[in-house]
Image: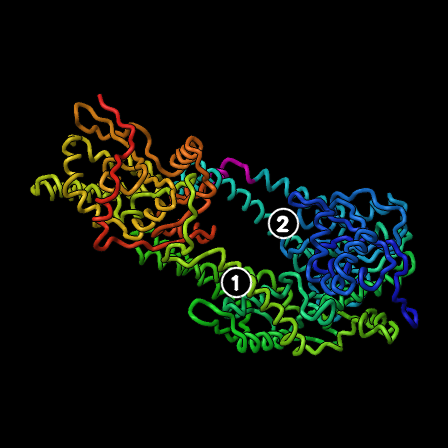
Amino acid sequence: MPHTAETELGTAHVLLTGATGFVGQAVLERLLTDHPATRISLLVRGKGGQTGQDRLRRLLRKPVFGTWREAVGAEEADRVAAERITVLDGSMTGIPELPSDLDLVIHSASTVSFDPPIHEAFDTNVNGAVSLYQALLASGSDPHVVHVSTCYVGGLRRGVVAEGKLEHDVDWRTEWRSATQAQERTELTSREPARLERFMSRARGDHGKEGPIAAARASENARREWVRSHLVDAGRRRAQSLGWTDVYTLTKALAERAAEDLWGEAGHRLSVVRPAIIESALRHPFPGWIDGFKVADPLIFAYGRGQLPDFPGLPDSILDVIPVDFVVNAILAAAANPAPADEPAYFHIASGASNPLPFHRMYENVRDYYTRHPLPRDDGFVEVPTWKFAGERKFNRRLLLAKKKADLWDAGLRILPNDERKRALAAQNARLRAGIATLGNFTDLYRAYVRTEIIFDDRNARALNNALPAEVREDRGFDVRRIDWEEYLQKVHLPSLSKLTAAHRRRKTAAARPAGTCPKPELPRRTDVLAVFDLERTVLDSNLVEQYLWVRTSGFRKAAWPKEVADLLVALPGYLRAERRDRGEFIRAFLRRYRGMPVARLEEVVGRGYADTMLRHTCADAVARIREHRAAGHRTVLVTGSIGLLAAPLAGLFDEVVGSSMHVRDGVLTGYLTKPPLVDEARAAWLRRYAEEGGYDLAASYGYGDSHSDLAWLSLLGKPSAINPDAELTRASHKRNWDIHRWKRSGSGVRGEVLAARPTMPRTDGKSD
């Protein structure tokens, strides 16, 4: 190391990979700000219809470049960027031809996940690095390469780890080939008939009510998730079997070895910079700058939200955190002071050796901050928990017991009737499961980082920092001993996270309104918009069974009542099984009970006592919403899988009522429908065609349903709402950020509104012999 280190890059032509990432953005900003004579080539891939150049334009308007743009002016910033920056449109696995006059390469691109599938980790980290060095060799350039890695390439070690070449004999070529083969084997295994049948069986049980296509889609999604899960597990297990914490650190270590084999020990200059856990900036470009949640931040955020009642970390383990501006300064210092050819240099940019931050100290700072600045929630503010730092075995036992409790709850919920109590219990259990999943995920992800007993020696990094000229050391140095952890955490990092979490809450609030009320904004006036309402449990607070009983009690002898009820009770378990399997199967089976009923008699019953009962069970909120839609010029449609005639008392509320019809012979119902009932995917197909023929805009249309079987057709609409939903539709609605409303039975006045409405007759496709 020279007595006085170089700090300038002069007129160097710099290739930067990973420029859109956290570290890459900060490196690019420093190059633009402090190294004005450099030329910069950026490897940026097109994404989402945007070219690499498009992404650069958006990138340069991010907060990290704000200070620079303000200093030089927006017009000058655009001119400088156009003059100095060249975009190479490509990716790490598809590198284009590189310039032949490169002086410096800063390779900071890598996967941002600790636990990706094994083939993805190798493809990005190992294949990406190999592709870069092969492209450099082909270009004829002989640049100094700064290879950005991670301190944690040291693996499952204890004690002090020196800055130097890793000691292992793992062949990166063999492991890369094996990872690719693992993907191929797993894909083939997932398609074996017995396994596919298991996927289909589970999908039919969970999604059968949505329809066969939905079940098939769920089965395929389950297969893909199974493949991904097995490949994630394969990566984790292979890494641990070789002595690394996870596939991320394994592949970063093998990428280093590839860099040494192909470049650093093959007659070229190589510097390997290994940062620890990179977090928000201490000073530059401004205190607290961060681009999204980083390594430790999801753990901090989850704690602040009260989601982590305890954690199995070692309180005296070192949480090796380093501000991003220290990392960038170290990268550029290493870049300006290349090692000799064939003698790679290694630098740990870490705090654990010179200014350690024990996990318990980090926890105390986070707890203190969120005690003084608690996060809001619906009923006030979050009270953060006190951790006991339970041992890993004890913690895992508690987690297993919690999972068993949630499974028992789910089993019990399946046999409960679909009412408000069941929905509340289902929501409570969903929250329990979410909490268990959060605990499990964080334990898996962070175990190696909060139970570590490793210290990263930083003597090379300290020597490089100390060799910087004194006049630039304040701005461009990276002496971790100057970090006051309480000051940094309490006044810089945690406040910056609070801003991110506040933005997260605003987006979440905007995306999902609270259940129980209709949307407040006035409906837009349009004539090409549909408002489609399901009947049972949506407009009415009843189901097909109750409607059948209304028919029987309104128009038949009381003496026949006991036998009818007894027959219904005997048949009820079969109906419930059919309902769980397939809504259409249930409707067909249940409507057979109308067999032998004279049509004229049914029409008479519907027009008398049945109508009065139906109006008493009509939801006032539904009537109000229907009237709002009609006032806005929307076409209102009531759809039922039952006999359309049974919806006749409500026909005046709607522009159209669409229902099933029953085959009639000699004026008597046969018990058979003339066409399959309009439920699940059949209703979706009908709705798509109805909109096409009528010129209606489904993306702007509204839908209201209550059941899991309504998911297929509700998903077609731009503005779906779940009304008094069952547990399955509730979960789906939360996942999709749909509105959820609780509509209640009519009070006084609804009967008059319905009777005063313009009458229309239900549209059915009846057929008589």
Q: Position of residue 600 (x, y in %)?
A: 15, 31
On the image, which quarter does residue 660 sit in?
top left
- Which residue is at a point 36% across and 59% down the rendered structure image? 425
- Which residue is at a point 59% across and 77% down the rendered structure image? 364
Q: Which residues are magenta?
A: 190-199
- Which residue is at a point 90% across and 45% down the rendered structure image? 140
| Residue 195 painted magenta | yes
- Which residue is at a point 89% across and 46% down the rendered structure image? 100
**Does residue 614 show up?**
yes
Q: Return the mark for residue 117.
A: 2
Q: Position of residue 320 (x, y in %)?
A: 69, 70
Would residue 214 appear left or right of 3 to someone viewing this image? Answer: left
Under tag 2, what secondary structure? loop
Specify the quadrant that holds the N terminus: bottom right
**Camera-nearest residue between 447 and 419:** 419
Q: Which residue is mark 1?
A: 505
